[in-house]
């Protein structure tokens, strides 16, 4: 009985690893990943731009300098994205950026989970 439980547990771990590795292989490649900072009277932040090799798996959000910013349909043009990652704002009442303990990258939405891919955004 104990051996079958152990085998089932190890099988579940193997399937989890296989699914995760397959998901990361089908994620689109991120190309031309850049960012530039901006500052005006009301707001400070970053313009993040990138292009995907295909758009069958949608990007959900971007992380830059520990700030998480959701990606909206307005941020997309074909396979290119331009996202305003807001760090500070006095124009938006009560604004606080969503901070995460994550390296720079992009979250993608798959059928089973949100998958994070680290991205080395280059400063323009």
Image (tube, grey):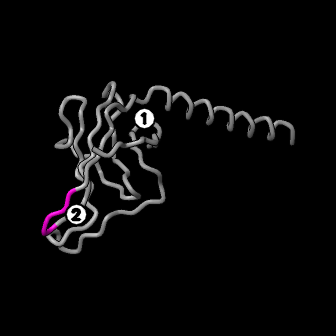
Which corner quadrant holds the C terminus?
Answer: top left
Residue 1 appears in view: no
Asked if the magenta segment contains residue 40, the reply would be: yes
Report the residue at 20% width, 57% height from top.
38
Crowding at label 2, few (<14), some or many (≥20) Cα neighbours within 10 Å? some
Report the residue at 14% width, 64% height from top.
40
Q: Residue furthest front?
A: 124
Q: How many angstroms separate mark 2 from mark 1 (CA)?
A: 35 Å
Crowding at label 1, few (<14), some or many (≥20) Cα neighbours within 10 Å? few
Q: Which residue is mark 1?
A: 111
Left or right side of 48 for 108: right
**Residue 117, x across and y down, in percent:** 45, 40
* Numbered range of the magenta stretch: 38-42
Residue 21 appears in view: yes
Which corner quadrant holds the N terminus?
Answer: top right
- The part of the image, by quadrant, that contains residue 7 is top right
Residue nearest the observer in this picture, 75 or 12? 75
Report the residue at 46% width, 42% height from top.
118
Q: Is residue 63 above or below residue 50?
A: below
Left or right side of 51 for 116: right
Q: Which residue is mark 2?
A: 44
**Residue 51, x across and y down, in percent:** 29, 32
Asked if the magenta segment contains residue 6, the reply would be: no
Secondary structure at numbered mark 1? loop
Label disc, if present, on residue 46 of the rendered structure: none
């Amino acid at each position: 009985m104990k051996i079958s439980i152990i085998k089932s547990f190890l099988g579940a771990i193997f399937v989890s690893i296989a699914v995760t590795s397959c998901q990361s292989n089908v994620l689109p490649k991120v190309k031309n990943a850049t960012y530039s900072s901006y500052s005006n009277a009301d707001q400070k932040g970053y313009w993040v731009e990138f292009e995907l090799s295909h758009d069958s798996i949608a990007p959900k959000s971007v992380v830059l300098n520990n700030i998480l910013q959701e990606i909206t349909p307005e941020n997309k043009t074909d396979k290119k994205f331009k996202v305003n990652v807001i760090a500070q704002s006095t124009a938006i009442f009560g604004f606080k950026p969503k901070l995460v303990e994550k390296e720079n990258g992009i979250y993608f939405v798959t059928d089973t989970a949100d998958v994070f891919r680290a991205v080395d955004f280059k400063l323009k």
